[in-house]
Image: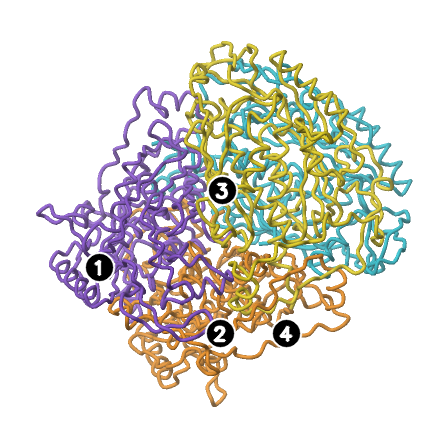
Chain colours: A cyan, B yellow, C purple, D orange
Amino acid sequence: MAGNSFGQLFRITTAGESHGPGNVVIVDGVPPGIPITVEDLQVDLDRRRPGQSKIVTQRKEPDEPEILSGVFEGRTTGTSIAILIRNQDQRSKDYSDIKDKYRPGHADYTFDAKYGFRDYRGGGRSSARETTARVAAGVIAKKLIAEAFGGQVVGYVKQVGDIVADIPRPEDVTLEQVEKRPDGEPNIVRCPDLAAADRMIALIDKVRKDQDSIGGVSEIVATGIPPGLGEPVFDKIKADLAKALFSLPAVLGVEYGIGFACATMRGSENNDVFERASEGARVERPEARAPSEPEASAPGAKSSASDNGPEVSDKGQARQPSPSIATQSNRHGGMLGGITSGMPIVLRAAIKPTSSLSKKQPTVDNTGTPTTIQTKGRHDPCLLPRFVPMGEAMVAIVIADHWLRWRAQCGWAP
Amino acid sequence: MAGNSFGQLFRITTAGESHGPGNVVIVDGVPPGIPITVEDLQVDLDRRRPGQSKIVTQRKEPDEPEILSGVFEGRTTGTSIAILIRNQDQRSKDYSDIKDKYRPGHADYTFDAKYGFRDYRGGGRSSARETTARVAAGVIAKKLIAEAFGGQVVGYVKQVGDIVADIPRPEDVTLEQVEKRPDGEPNIVRCPDLAAADRMIALIDKVRKDQDSIGGVSEIVATGIPPGLGEPVFDKIKADLAKALFSLPAVLGVEYGIGFACATMRGSENNDVFERASEGARVERPEARAPSEPEASAPGAKSSASDNGPEVSDKGQARQPSPSIATQSNRHGGMLGGITSGMPIVLRAAIKPTSSLSKKQPTVDNTGTPTTIQTKGRHDPCLLPRFVPMGEAMVAIVIADHWLRWRAQCGWAP
Amino acid sequence: MAGNSFGQLFRITTAGESHGPGNVVIVDGVPPGIPITVEDLQVDLDRRRPGQSKIVTQRKEPDEPEILSGVFEGRTTGTSIAILIRNQDQRSKDYSDIKDKYRPGHADYTFDAKYGFRDYRGGGRSSARETTARVAAGVIAKKLIAEAFGGQVVGYVKQVGDIVADIPRPEDVTLEQVEKRPDGEPNIVRCPDLAAADRMIALIDKVRKDQDSIGGVSEIVATGIPPGLGEPVFDKIKADLAKALFSLPAVLGVEYGIGFACATMRGSENNDVFERASEGARVERPEARAPSEPEASAPGAKSSASDNGPEVSDKGQARQPSPSIATQSNRHGGMLGGITSGMPIVLRAAIKPTSSLSKKQPTVDNTGTPTTIQTKGRHDPCLLPRFVPMGEAMVAIVIADHWLRWRAQCGWAP
Amino acid sequence: MAGNSFGQLFRITTAGESHGPGNVVIVDGVPPGIPITVEDLQVDLDRRRPGQSKIVTQRKEPDEPEILSGVFEGRTTGTSIAILIRNQDQRSKDYSDIKDKYRPGHADYTFDAKYGFRDYRGGGRSSARETTARVAAGVIAKKLIAEAFGGQVVGYVKQVGDIVADIPRPEDVTLEQVEKRPDGEPNIVRCPDLAAADRMIALIDKVRKDQDSIGGVSEIVATGIPPGLGEPVFDKIKADLAKALFSLPAVLGVEYGIGFACATMRGSENNDVFERASEGARVERPEARAPSEPEASAPGAKSSASDNGPEVSDKGQARQPSPSIATQSNRHGGMLGGITSGMPIVLRAAIKPTSSLSKKQPTVDNTGTPTTIQTKGRHDPCLLPRFVPMGEAMVAIVIADHWLRWRAQCGWAP
């Protein structure tokens, strides 16, 4: 096992390179009966794909998924779901002149060091194209947590260069705000603070013209997450979320809640005060759970389920803490002792500036001889806008996984 | 499996609560022949234990380990190693009055939410006492990476409150500097910038007198790590290191290399330039590997090993990079594409101020009724000094694990 | 990870050697609230321990367990449970003269081949003493499946040498029949066919006097198991059960249902016919589930659980298939397509004769020089009577594991 | 995780149903540099596929694999390998009339019990079509063990009904004998005892005409396997091999070495005697390892490997047993204490008669109402001939996995 799987119960396994036939993901452990279609997958794949706006790479990839298994008559069957996304616009000649050179900031040298040789056409397995597989799997995770308890994961761009968005209540940001401006135009930089968004776009445009790139910070928020998810020691949900985000390309830092700012705080000012959840204090579930009722004739219809299923009647009904406990503030970012508190989960990831630059950079080749390199490919001047769906996907997968884990161990009492 | 194991090949599994009989760790996957003694374990356990100085909690725990298995005549046998560390100073009466109250910043509420009830005596499984097990296992990991390739892991305190140490070359900090001052006195705050250390101690002393606590940042540095460790996708070594550190109590943020500062950088200034490793540019291995040569009569002695070992003609021996590649700077923190580059690995973890405070704090009980709480136990006014060995242990375990993983898959070529 | 863990969700990790301080098991993933005491553990440890009757090894080991964690006020807390069983009667001098010789049928040579050296005092990690840890964990698994759905696992001796017990309805054998004769005397060979039992005891007595040993077959039966447990591909429950039994020492074969006899059958005579479960045809649950009701003040009491727990109301109530489907016969041994059918699970394991013999045997030493060996230790002339609790434990662990897995994925429907 | 992965280090994950678009396998953990082509995969897929002879099902499936990733210029890269095998001849109308009926001996009822509903078109995920993915992965495992140490896995049909082949030396059976008769005609029943083969073919022909089916036993032999593979406790190699074989459809029993016959043996007659391996006594490696030497310009060529590989001074090279130890007989089937002894591994699996019959059988529908069923599809009258490549694949995967595990932990000594 060489690290191509993620998750314990909601488990994804991926394969694929930037210049091979395509990328594939097998999603294992999905409960039966979740509605899922190719169109559902396409929505987030479109948010991730290249060529969607002027501020991202112009590589053309339709990223159309094919569901190979695990879905029958529009619902998951409980067996493993395989999804294939073929590559289209490979243009391998763009890369052939850099076969023996180590691109600065890339994994070329470390791949050679690890494996002894590498697929030199583009990033191979280290290319961000592998994240298509994650995003497709993330859609299924989002569906699951929405069906199960109305959970939602929304990410956005919090910072590009020194432009920091003002987002007073992260838990109030909606997917619509992230994707669309009030005038209906796409919010191409995915920052809900529109004034900041305009300045971010201008900055990205400028670095692109400079043949350069720029870093930033993305914030990912999960709402409607029940308290009690996560394990007390190694698999703290904060630890699994951090691993999930750090496993994405270009992430150099992750924090949650107050994050690094805690270093200068005193305990008396940092501790969030518990209180009985008032109507307003506790983040309301984004929407009352509205499970898509199966038709009488559909697979998974209640009648057939109750006729033939094994002897457990759990239908996911709300065991609502009574009284609900909340905190007056959320410096703890929704997690205490590695376990969700019921407050919104707020995470931030720092993304480095794209390593590939059109401008000439000094480097060495694989004999150590100094040379220069200029990557003519089409690259993102800023990774942030396309990072958002990747980050959301990974966060949703972790939450789905921990919900299944909670169900297995704690969803039942003797 | 409820998250009490960590690592794939070098794998630890722990159990134990703050007020039970003790803590135990089973370390699985350790190669045979590594020298290990109870005294080796005691060194780091002493660095972690309470009561070691005036600026940490005064709870008395000798933390003496007993090796129950897996070591024979002073060397690991290859079978699972169990280590037991009994609790001594439990004083459960300190906690009995808070049985129904939720301590702010603690896992009391989230444990109730997860399990339906909890061991209310102290933190139970969420207490930092569980880290004794990690620190003991970490000693074995440190031994392994030192034996195998001369790897070293050294941590220290980088920041307490707004006091930031000046550490121009993290890779040059030695364990001796972290533990001892030039005059031979212990460096009780574990900060190698002694001027900063004095101010940190004064600050910690002040917050203690204020019945308060303070946060900080620890930096952990791994040197002598070969390039090529880590997996390209989910198990990027940065991701596993982040999970390792986030799995420790009170960690709210992790970054490596330039970290969050990357957000404001341009690619042209952030990319580290590759070069042929000159004598000085590349961080030298801390010491030429000096494996403890087994005596002729010892188990694992070369003669017996070569007589009885299995017939495998390992071909991947001693693949020495020729020429070595290094980078002129280390903003990438020793990892590119999730794989080690051979440059020092530099990580930072943000630690929140201790949640337990002697001063009275408002909270609720488990019926949601407002009340106050005052934790009379003996608590650390600042977690940083004792965090250092915990952070080192987790980093060493990840590196040991990935070295074994590299050996399994890539240490041989057809 | 070197194979010292077993199970996915109900997961045990063990350590310990025959001549070290003791054996330890960490049981992870146990639901909170299961009642468990040291006395519960002792019952099966006593069934496994040496010295319990004249036909087993006379080594004296009280095998008294200490619970180190994970149990609070008599109930599991949901955190990892560590159990320590110290060794007492080690007598390492019994073994010191065989330090360099390879005992026939033992793992001495293969340990040397694997690790390069070995703990030569007795079997070390390959000794059957490691099964104390499994048996202790098995008690918890048995408790869980009894609490959850009234499941029971009962094993017995089916064959010793050429003496085959006549057990017309395996599902009707009770633990009482296995342990006690009608006159109240212990059933020391654990065969419920008492006529066969008498002949087995005589045979074992004879081979012991001949300084020899004898093989046999154990049958393990699980009743009250709901249909639907097991995974359709690699983790078929038959596959996990087979691995569980083959992981025990001395097992050379495993079969279920009709087993190897299927080779000569035609499909038309082998297929079991489905039918609506009549009152009698379907194996009734051994006893209506009688969960031990928690006292009002106990941890895990319903009131507190429902007050503070997360939002799921699953209490393990019987979702009874309506109508129940059964089969007229049970050649399929309770599993179809790797998934339980609700019929009794019937397994058989073939156990080889003990390899250690008091009589002199030819062998070689570790230089390949021919020599002879005579193992003076106290050995079982027949492994079968003590195998029964080991086999039961492993079967119970697999069923507990798959029940948790089923709950996680399928215990809920959108 | 719902059981769609197998193996620890050499790890396969599969997806696919009988009537969906196809089957896919992701193979993770394969060392870089192993030569592999689509043609290699096709060889074993052709041995497994339907329609290859008159005694197997006439369903037409070319089973042509597409390699989607992980192979570059004819060699494995070390990244995950995805292989897609599309379904062609689905004919779902053959099955539509049995939508609500439970086929005897099939997983229809147990799937309904597990998931609440099922893909009723054929077996879905429980169909033997999923084994295409295993067989493709098995080819890679066979390549690996052949490259690494000259290991070979050969299976054949040992028994059909009451016809038992006479195979005096299992380790001498060659792939050629299994596949071809001396006259060059295919050995369609895959039994190397040609007299028995003729009778088996006649018997299978007869049961087919009777609209019935027949069971049998397959023997799988692995030769050239180094001593020392396998783990001493739960992951005994016998346990993993048993799980591997039991995870295949229709397997009701597995044994190795003397197997169930051990029940009637005495220790003095069962123990195999160790001896210094004479030239002839020890099974010679089938062929001296002849690794395909990489061309100078190929990826993975030695020069580049030694130039760029990580700096690890692997010390465990070529530990050649001196003198070699063997046993005079092989009742232990090549495994002692769960670890390979260097003698041939000999396994047997009992395969039940095909459950699908053309003749009418009584059953019930999913309301429990009695009915009859007649499966008109094209089914194998005997599963044995096509089982052989499936069994070989699973055995090769286990051996490859344990070799990588051995390398990780024990292939190096301090």
Residue identifier under label 4? D291
Q: B221 or B63: nearer the eye?
A: B63
Q: Which residue is mark 2?
A: D324
Say few, some or many: other residues with alpha carbon within 10 Å of mark 2 (under 14 / 14 to 19 / 20 or more): many
The disc labelled 3 sits on which kind of residue?
Thr
Earlier residue among tags 4 and 2: 4
- Do badges 2 and 1 share one subunit? no
Give the amino acid at mark 1. Answer: Lys
Judging by the rendered image, the residue that carries numbered circle 1 is C158
The answer to whether marks 2 and 3 sit on the same chain is no
Q: Position of residue B250 (x, y in %)?
A: 60, 27
Q: Mark 1 — on which chain does it sit? A: C
Rendered view: C156 above or below C414: below
Q: Nearer the viewer, residue A105 or B145?
A: B145
Marks 3 & 4, CB-CB < 8 Å contact: no
Secondary structure beneath label 3:
strand
